[in-house]
Each structure stands twice: as structure tokens, then as C-alpha cells.
Image (tube, rainbow, N blue to C red):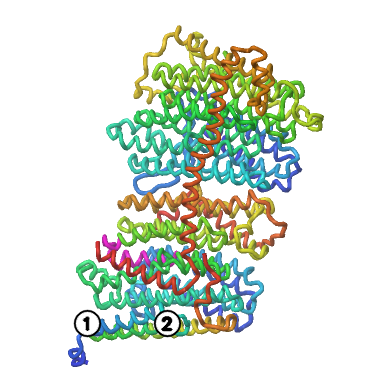
Amino acid sequence: MEHTTQLVPLNWYLLLSTFLFCLGVMGVLIRRNAIIILMCIELMLNSVNMLLVAFSSYSGNSDGQVFVFFIMVVAAAEVAVGLALLVSIYRNLGSTDIDLLNKLKW
Amino acid sequence: MTFLGLMIPLLPLLGFLVNGLLGKYLPKGSAGWIGSLSVLASFVCVLLIFKDLQAEQAISIDVFNWIALGDFSISFGLWIDALTMIMLMVVTGVGFLIHLYSIGYMHGDEGFTRFFTYLNLFIFFMLLLVMGSNYLMMFIGWEGVGLCSYLLIGFWYKNEPFNDAAQKAFVMNRIGDLGFLLGMFFILFHFGTLDIQTVEQLAPGLASNGGLIMIITLLLFIGATGKSAQLPLYTWLPDAMAGPTPVSALIHAATMVTAGIYMIVRSNVLFALAPDTLTIILWVGVITSLFAAIIGLKQNDIKKVLAYSTVSQLGLMFVALGLGAFSSGIFHLVTHAFFKALLFLGAGSVIHALHGEQDIRKMGGLKKLIPITYITFILASLAISGFPLLSGFFSKDEILAHAFEQNKIVWIVVAVSSFLTAIYMFRLVFLTFFNNFRGSDETRSHIHESPWTMTFPLVVLCILAVLGGLIGLPAIFHVSHWLNTYLASVTEPSAALIHHGDGISHGLEIGLMCFAGLAAIVAIYLMYRKYVMQKAIPESEESQQGFIKAIANKFYVDEFFENAIVNPVFKLSEWFGTFFDKKIIDQIVNRTATTITSGGQALRLSQGGNTGTYVLAMVIGIVVLFIIRLLI
Amino acid sequence: MNTLIYTAGLGMVCLAMEILDLRKLLVPVILLGLAVIFGVNLMSWADSGPVIFAGLDMSSMLLVDHFSVAFNGVLIVAAAFLFAMSHDFYKDEQHHLSDYLTIIVFILCGAMVLTSYSNLVMMFLGIEIVSISLYILAGSRRHDLRSNEAGMKYFLMGSFASAVLLFGITLLYGASGSFKLTEIASYAATYGMDSPMFLVGSLLVVCAFLFKVAAVPFHFWSPDVYEGSPSLVTTLMATLVKVSFFAAFYRLMSSGFAGIDPHTSTILVIVAAATMIVGNLVALKQINFKRLLAYSGIAHAGYMLLAILSLKTNSASALLFYGATYILATIGAFAVALPVFSSTGKETIDAFDGLGRKKPFIAGMLTLSMLSLAGIPPLAGFLGKYYIFSEAIHNGYVAITLLAVITSIIGVYYYFKVILAMYTKAGEDTEIQFPMLYSIVGIICVALSILLGLWPGGLMGLL
């Protein structure tokens, strides 16, 4: 562990996961397919996971790594619910395009 | 005494609960008696207290400690002193008569029970308003009477304009309430209490902080302009005539609209410390009183005339307050409650007889057909016009005397507006009751005098309207002014703060009284010539015929009056009514309301239903907040 | 802690009852269970020592203090109302009853975690327990496209906000080296905003909370989701969930960020102002009742943000009081609205036309609830506003408080629109079915609103 941390400075992890996070945000903003959006949100969560692990190992505090497991579990639950919703929408609408979801407005 | 004091508001509340909850199970028509008797019982409580309570005494009833937060507390308390007593007698007394009258007037209406439910609730809130020992209690009543007022204006909901009228009353009152509420917050944070008596005691100590007191009083006055229909928030009152006539009598003439006057007199020390506010009140009152009187000249709806008249009379009361003559304001409030309630009830009786006809051009000749209504109505009109020795004469004269003493211009304007009062009232009287009936024969055959539940209140109020002036006889009669003495404990602290003149001499006072009485008589005569002898009715007045006929009759004097005074004034009235009232005031208020709602509409459209846009808005929100965070 | 454990246990019992096919007993059992839990909660008021579970000190995870016990009490009562109403609301969906009710029990668990967390991990878990359950409930009418849409929108935006929250938490962890609120607080007190990582982290967490409480500009989900969800779920979101998020937000700001720094307070002032303006103005033009209450909820979120702003003077009691009055008034309104909706088949304001004539008593309940929401004295809603506003003024937020007063006056208009519809419009002659449980819930809510309006001391003095 010791030598890897010396190889890559913490800031690089920070930059990388911020970049991935922003990529996820861009994906959510640009893509219209609900499945892709779901994946982009996963990307955001995973960038956070990576950052947590990095912080955890740099500070020698295991809390962060434990938290990663929590996030994974929660993300799995979220995806399960999300996909279920997606299926019922697909049955009713025949599409997964979120732009079609605009009955509720104003 | 405490028990009686508590019963005063609780009895109408009980009536409300019984009617509201059990109304369905009670025999039809009993709601009216339940409602009326609960108010009567409350009136009896008031009288019992009045018998024992000395003028300088006050009863303070702390029902319980309402809010205790850190260093200050507000009690749920009632406060009964001389001023409260006067208001209580008006509210419960006149209120009872109007309840009684409504039994006959609303007979057979499908919303009979509902009507009395609202009416009792109104009385309850009105009593809270006048009895509240702190501004918060007063505000509860203030909001409550507002709510009942909207419900009653929109009572006949099948008619859409009625709902619009309720809406308008709502918007204008909200502006006023905002003033009241903000005033209350300012009081709380600078006096640390909302208790009226404590504020009144602390206020002189803060006199050096004049600007602050001026802001507070101005805010409270904005509240008063909303409730008491003063410029620029008055146009809701004429529109509120859409409600049933007893409502107009009770809420829009005798009680609720005088809440603003009551509130200012209640906080008279505060207002006395803000001379600039008093000046503003004075001029708002003067202008309102004149404008409303002018507009009233040309109205053809019997209730609209009375509505503008109410606005004008309320203006007169504000003039009294602005002059620092607080007890004169209350005096006129009391006499006005009598004769204006009577006028509205009389108008209601006329409308009842004519099956809903409100246009005075289609009336006429009713004096033989509904004699009791006629006699009471004409006495009330004489009273409001300031005919000598009737109640309105004394109360108006007192205000005129104060005006004469302090500011001659105010006196002139107020004298003119009270002259106009006589004109529009007698235009109304002559068109309604004299000459021949102008409606259809079919209607005529159905005209009948109202049942006793309606005529009895008319007679009682008529006696009050005639004799009401006795509570405030001027000094020249060599008896003490009872009302001033009675209210002395309330108004004394402020009297010391306002510089009054030395008073006017008895001779001058008699002169002024004669002048006012004479003016009223001249006005009545002018109208008699025009509408009874010449039989003018509003439509034909501009036609050639009337003009030629007048010349042919060689009424040169009349011609002079007609062309030099009456016609221009009528023209002005028409212009004010259409241009000023509808175009300017209504537009400003409506524009404010529509600007706000269209702002809402624009923002509403930002909610396009598209998830992508929502997320984008969130991201932009985060970025903007981030930038703000970094910049400051 | 016991409260939470018992509530989770109640959820298990509900699941077991489904297996044993005891659906008919479900609502009574849950109500009974909640009564027990309420008692357990009351008992934990006295002992505010460290939280010991299975021999381990859990204080760094959950902290049972007066704040959490008081809020839990309010939430349990709110949940009891919701369950009582669910009996009739889910009458036609008996085969899903236990699913729905169990999920609501678990939402209550999540809400309890939110009131008592002392660690960001627990905060995250609490938020997710509540949110994921709500995604399911919002989309629970599977064949109704509007419900699907509500669920999906809520899900997408909610998980997006969760990701933002996580990123913020991670940055806070990176800066302070811990998830514990106490250590974050001491870090904030020493280094505060000098650390850019902490600054960004705190901002992102605040934004995520603003999303959860539906503050402008993060409010867009709420009207759509409120409108599309089944009405009972709307009630749940508008009351229990909203207040628990506010409790969590307050806890974070007061014990996590060591009070509020001037920069954050400026941001919150801007957000609160925008929230009040947008919430009240847009509500003016709404015709759908649920949407109207969504915007009203946004406006109320603006007022409650004032309590968060003024935490220097311990405005927790003001927030508690406001939350309780808001819950009571909103549930009181929905207790009338739900049966009216199902009888008339409409969810617009004109569904209430003529209700004052047809059912004066029911209409009276809705009137009082609306008046309480509008903040008309002597109902509790007025005092709630009053406390929050006076706290804000004591903390020097005069301008924003004036704005709050003005917007709340504007707000009176749309609440009165409902009242005027009931009393001054003639409605169709549809018979309105009004089941007993709804009226009981309505009566209790309105009675409590009046009682709290007249005797606020009981709830006010708690914190």
C-alpha cells in the first residue's frame, strides 16, 4: 500500500473522479434514453466510490472503504427499483425515452 | 363581570356552532331565531356590563396565557373599557336588529341556514376584534370578519359577478392586511409586546423615535384603508353590494368597515405621537369623502348610492381622526351605524317589495305603497344629510367645528361633501318614493309592505337615528357631551399630546350649525324641484325636452343652479365614476393583482414537464450557487 | 435507538403478516404497534446517554437526544394518520396492501434515522431508505402512466441528487478525515472554509438537501411527482418525508457545520427568497389540488429554511412546531381531499365545488386546514409562521422575513380559492362517500391544529 500512494498523488485521484463525475452529469444532461441515464448515474456513484477509497487509503482510515460497500448496496437497490419502473413504463409507452414523460407539467 | 364579558363573544360562537353543525337537523327556519337570539343574549350581556361599569373602569379578562416565548408573552385576553363598550353596543345591538330583519328578508332562500351561520360567525369575529386586548387578538378578528365578508358577498354564488366582487374585496383587503401585519411586527420588535394598553403606555417614552412611530402608524393606517374602504383601496366596497342587503347593512355599513376607525382610536396615543401620519389620514379622509360623494351623485343602483355614501361618511370619520378628534370620530361612527344600517335595511325593504329591482329609475311613487319603509327611510336620509336636530346633524357638526377650528380648507371641502350628501340622498329618496311608479304594472300589483320582522328593526333603528345625537349634544345646549365624557379615559392620554385650538366660541358654533342645517335644507329643496316638481328621471335629463321645458317654465334661478352647479357637478360625478373609479383605481389594483398572477403564470410555464430540463436547472442552480459562494 | 429498532421490527411483522395471510388485521396491528412505539419513544426522552446496542457504543452513528425524540414523536403521529387513511385508500388494492404499508413503515424507519444520525453514513442511509421507498410508492400504480411518470422522474432526479450528495460527503470526508458529525464540526471550527475541498463538499451536501426539501431551483420534481403519485403517497411526501428531511438538514447544519457561516447563510437566504416567491406565485395559477399543495409545500419549505438560517438562537423548537402544524394542516386537508377525489374522479380544485352545502362539517374541516396553512390566527399555522419569523428577525434576517410576510399574504389567495370553491360555487350533484376513518383523522388533525394554535406551550417548550 505504502508505495502506491507515493506513486500517485492524491490530487490526481481527485481530478480523475471529478472528471468522471462530471462525465456522468453530462451524460445525464445529454442522453434521453432512461437506461443510459441510469448508467451515467452509476458512473457518478462509482467515481465517488473511487475517490472514497483513495481518501481512505491516504488517510489510513478505513471508514471510507466501509462506506463504499454501503454505496454499492444502495446503488444496487436503486438500480433494481429504477429498472422496475423502467419496465412498467416500457410496457405502457413502448419506449424508454424520457422526453415522452411530459404528461405532468405546469 | 368576567363571566358576562366572556359570554359576549361566546354566545354568537355558540349560535354559529349550533347552526353550522346541527342546522340540517333543526326545523326549517329555526336557524334565523337561533342566530338572532344568540346575538340578543350577547347584547343583554353588554347592557348588564354597561350598567355596572364606570366610564373610567376597564375589565381585563385573561383567558389564558397564549404565547410564552422567552422574554415576552401574549395572553389570549379580552379588554373592555369605555370605547369597547360603545363598539359592543353598536355591534350586538345593531347586529341583533339586522339578524331579526334577515329572518324576513332571507325567508325562503335555499341558503337560509348557511346565511345565519356566516352571520353569527361574523358577529363573533367582530366582537373579538373590538374586545381583543392585544393586536394579535385584533388581527384574528380582523381576518375573521374578512373571511365572513367574502363568504357573504359571494353568498348568491350562481351569479358570477358576485364572485368577482368577493375576489376584488379579497385582493384589496389583503393589501390592507399586509400593512396591519407589518405594523404589528414593527410594534412587537420595538415595544417587545403586542398588548395594546402596554404599547399605549410605552409609546410616549419612545416619542424621540418619531420616524419609527410614524412607520408603525402608517402601516396600521394602510390596514385601516383596506378595511374601511378609503382611497385608494375603496372600490371593493361598492362592488361588495352584490351580497344580500342585510350583509351590506351589517358588514359594509355598521360594523366591519368601521374596524379601521376603531383600530386607530384604540391606538390613539400612538397616532397622536405621529402628527405626520395624522395629516396623511386627514387628507386621505378629506379626499375620499369628497370623491365618493361626487361619484354617489350619479349612481342609479339604490345600493351603490348607499355604498358610495358609506365610503364618503367613513372618509368623514377619518377626517375627525386626522384632526385628533378621536371621540368625534366614534360619535359619527355610532350615529352612522344607526342611520346607514337603517338606510340599507330600508333599501332592502324596497328591493324586497319590488322583487329584486335595484334600479332607482324603475322605482318611484312607493311612499303610499310601503309607508313604514318610506317614513323610516326619509328620516334616515334627513339624519345623514345633517338635517337639524337629527343624529347626523350633531355628529357631523362636531367634525365640521373641529375642521373649522384647525384648517379652513378642510372645513370647506368637508362642508361641500356634506352638502353633496344631502343632494345624492334626496335624489335617491325622491326618485324612489315620489311621483308615479315607473316599473311594470305587474310588479306594481305585487308591491307590499314587508313583514314585521323587517319593519320592527326599521322602526327601532329609526328612533335611534333620530335621537342618537343626544349622546353628544354640543356645549351650546348647556349639557355635558356625554360621549366625550364617557370616552375621556380612552382619549385623554392622546389629548395631551395633540395641540388643540382654544375651541370656537358659542356664537360661531351656532353660526356653523345654522349654516350646515341651511345647506342641507337648500340641497333638499334643489332636489325636490328637480325630481319631484320637474319629475326629472336620470335618463331624460340631458334631452332637449327637459331643457326647453325648464326655460319655458322660466325657472331662471333654477336654471342658474342647474347649469352652474348641479349639472357640472353631475358631469363631474359621471366622470369620476367612470374614469377615476373604474379606470384609475380599479386598474391600479387589478393591475397589481394581474401582474402578480401573470408572474405566477410565467414561472409556471418554466415547469415544462421535461426531466432533462429539470436536471439541467438543478445543475445550473448548483453552479450559480457555487459562483455566488465564491464571489462573496 | 429503541424507537428505531421497534419500528424496524414492526416492518418485519407486517411482512410476516402477509405470509400468514392476515391482511385484514394489518392496519389495526400497525396502529397498535405505532402506539407502542410512541410510548417507547416517550420513555427515551429521559435517558439521553450514549446509545448502546449489543454491547457496542453506537453514539458515533446515532444519537438519541431531545431533538430526535421530539421529531420522532411528531413523525410517528403523522405516520399513524397516514396508516389510518390507508385502510380506505387501498380498499381496491388489497393484494398489495401489505407491500405498500410495509414500505411506509420502512420510510418511517428512514425518517427516524434522519432525525437522529450523528454520522454522515447514517445520514446517507436514512436519505436513501426514504427516497428509494418513495420511488416505489410514487410509481406504484403500474398501469397508470401518470404514476409511472411520477416514479421515473422522481427516481432519475432523486438518484442524481443522491450522487451529488455522495460526492459532497466524500469531499467532506477527504477534508476532515471522518464521517462523524462531531469531528466534522471541530474541523469546520478550526479550518472552516479555508479548505476548498470542505467548501465544495459542504455546498454540494447543502444542494442535495435543498433538492430533497424541494427548494428553488431544485424544486422541479415536486409538483410533477406530487400530482402523478397516488394521493396517499403525495400526502406522505408532503408531510412526514418533508419534515424529516428538514430535521436532518437542521441537524447537519447545527451539529455538522458548527452553526452557519456567513457565506452559506447568504446562499440560503437567496434560495429561501426564490423558494417563497416561486412557490407562492406559481401556486396562484394552479387548478390541480395536489399540484397546488405541492407549490404550497415549496413555499412552506421557504419559510422553514428561515428556521435553518436562524439556528444561532436554537430555532429547533420553532422548526419542530412549524413542522408539526404543517403536517397537521396538510393531513387534515388531504383527509378531506382523498375521499372527494375518489368520489368525484377529479383532482382539481373544482372537485370541491359546493362541498360547503353538501357536507358542511367536512367542508369546515378543510376550511380550517386551509386557514392553518395560510397562517390565519388563531390556528396553529399562524403561530408556526410567527415563531419562525420572529426567530429570523432576532437573528437579523429582517429583509427576508419581510419578504416572507409579503409572500405569505399573497399565499392566502390560493388557499382561499379552495375555500371559496366550497362555499360560493354550485357543484355537481355527485354523492360524496366519506368513510369514517377519514373523518376521524380529519377531526383529530383539525382539533390539534386549533389546540396548538391556542396552547402552543406544550410543543413549543420541548426543545
Q: Main secondary structure of the magenta part?
A: helix
The answer for which chain carries disc 1 is: A
Residue C237 locus on image (x, y percent): 50, 68
Judging by the rendered image, the residue that carries numbered circle 1 is A11
- Secondary element under disc 2, as helix, strand or loop, is helix
- Secondary element under disc 1, as helix, strand or loop, is helix
The answer to which of B3 and B433 lies nearer the viewer is B433
Disc 1 from disc 2: Cα separation: 27 Å
Judging by the rendered image, the residue that carries numbered circle 2 is A74
Mark positioned earlier in the residue sequence (1 or 2)? 1
Left or right placement of residue C322 versus residue A46 in this view: right
Left or right placement of residue B480 versus residue B558 in this view: left
Residue, x 48% and y 34% (percent of image)?
B230
Q: Is residue C306 magenta?
A: no
Q: Is residue C255 magenta?
A: yes
Residue type pointed to by label 2: Val
**Is residue B44 at all visible to an observer of this figure?**
no
Give the residues in magenta.
C243-265
Residue type pointed to by label 1: Asn
